Structure formats: C-alpha cells, structure tokens
Amino acid sequence: QGHTHIIAALYQAGADLNRQNYNGDTLAHLAAAQNQEKILPVLHQTEVDFDIKNHKQQTPAHVAAMKGHAPIITFLHQAGADFDKQDSNGCAPIHFAVEAGHEEALSALLQAEVLMDEKNKEGDTPVHIAAYKGHTQCIVALHECGAALDKQNKEGQIPVHLAAQEGHEETLKAFYQANVKLNPKDKWGKTPAHFAAANGQAACIRVLHQVGANLNAKN
C-alpha cells in the first residue's frame, strides 16, 4: 500500500527486506508491480538488492516492464539495476515491454541503453515480439535506436515473417519503409507471403504485392 514509514520501521527493527514470498517475490518486486514509486527509494536506502529473481527468474525490472511502469524503470536504472538479466524463458525486461506495447516503458529501457537484440530461448528478439503483436511504434522506436530488424530466430524467421503471419499490415509497411527485405526464407524455405497465405491474411498479401514482394516463391 506504499506505507514507507512502516518499511523504514521494519528495517530499523532488523527485518530482512530481501526476503522472498512463496512466488519468490521480494518487496521490490511487489513495489514494481503496484507502481509504488515512493517505496523504492526507501528500499534503496536500506541497500535492498534490486536484481533478485523470483521463481520465474524475473527481477523487479521484468515486473515493471511487464506492467508498463516507466517511472519505476527509470528509478531502478538510477539505482544500478541490471536490465539485461533473462528470465526462465530467456526474456529480458525489454521483451515484456514490447510484448504489451508499453511505449513509455520501452523508452525508459532504451534510455538506459539496454541490449536491444538479445534473444530469448526461442531465438526471438524484442523486434520479433513486437512484430508478432503488431506493435509498430515499438518497432520504430527500436529501429531508431539501432536495433536490427532482420535477426533470425531458431526457425530462421525474421520479424517480418511474424508480422505477415499475424495480419499486421501497418507493421509490414513499417518494415518496408525501413528497407527490410520482404522475401527472406526461413529454415523451411517459407517467405512472409507463405505465412500470410497459410493464415488467411489477405490484407498482408495485398501489402506485400504492392511493395514488390515475390508471391511466386516456392518453399
């Protein structure tokens, strides 16, 4: 509930403020989840470890990114938290920010100069995740900061494959405007057009045709 005086009193009484609950969450995880900006400075003064992982191997930064709490991310950065730690699925906080389309949280992470091309266990970068979800503005922000738009995941797919698969026409257009090749093949020889056709994404087929993609490519 954000009762800073109680936190301070507990610390003075010798309480362990790094103690984890049944989910492995610390007070810092809970403060990040509930956007309790006033709590974190108190915890920082007591030298709480902001990089402790819960049972999902997520730090408070993961939680803040997931919830879209940009001010929490900014404070954690100032306090020296590590934003490149990966959870049990290999995801860093930036993966969570783009998955939910939290543009302000993403901006805070980018200002902290996090790794933008880090891959999770599926080989997906944050751009893959943003493309799959159709969060075009996240992709634009990542690109402006230098993120690669054509990294391959474990299936040999680049983000444009996922945008076509999920029917995100505006995202496809953004990739085209960023000079991303629209005829790349994955490990099975499939192009973005194959993905769009297999999933009934007629609008994406039209976009790909309009920008000159090869609709006759064979897998």
Image (spheres, helix red, strand yellow):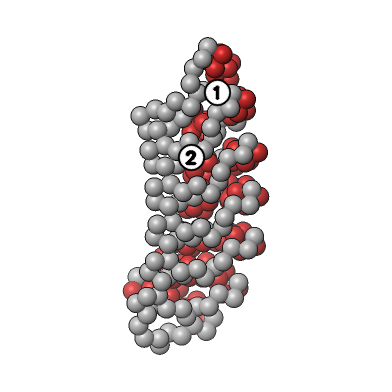
Nearest to N terminus: mark 2 or mark 1: 1
Provide the secondary structure element on which disc 2 rests. Answer: loop
In front of the other: 208 or 26: 26
With respect to residue 32, does 208 lie above or below?
below
With respect to residue 95, does 185 lie above or below?
below
The residue drawn where x is 45% and y is 42% is: 58
The residue drawn where x is 43% and y is 66% is: 153
The residue drawn where x is 53% and y is 41% is: 61
> Visible in this render: residue 63?
no
- Of circles 2 and 1, the one toward us is 2
> Visible in this render: residue 152?
yes
Provide the secondary structure element on which disc 1 rests. Answer: loop
Label 1: few (<14), some or many (≥20) within 10 Å?
some
Residue 71: image quadrant is top right
Circle 1: residue type = Gly
Measure the alpha-carbon separation of dots 2 and 1: 19 Å
In front of the other: 30 or 54: 54
According to the picture, the residue beneath numbered tag 2 turns out to be 59
In front of the other: 55 or 99: 55
With respect to residue 190, does 45 lie above or below?
above
Residue 115: image quadrant is bottom right
Query: Tag on residue 2?
Result: 1
Which of the image's four quarters has the C terminus?
bottom left
Q: Position of residue 122 (x, y in %)?
A: 39, 60
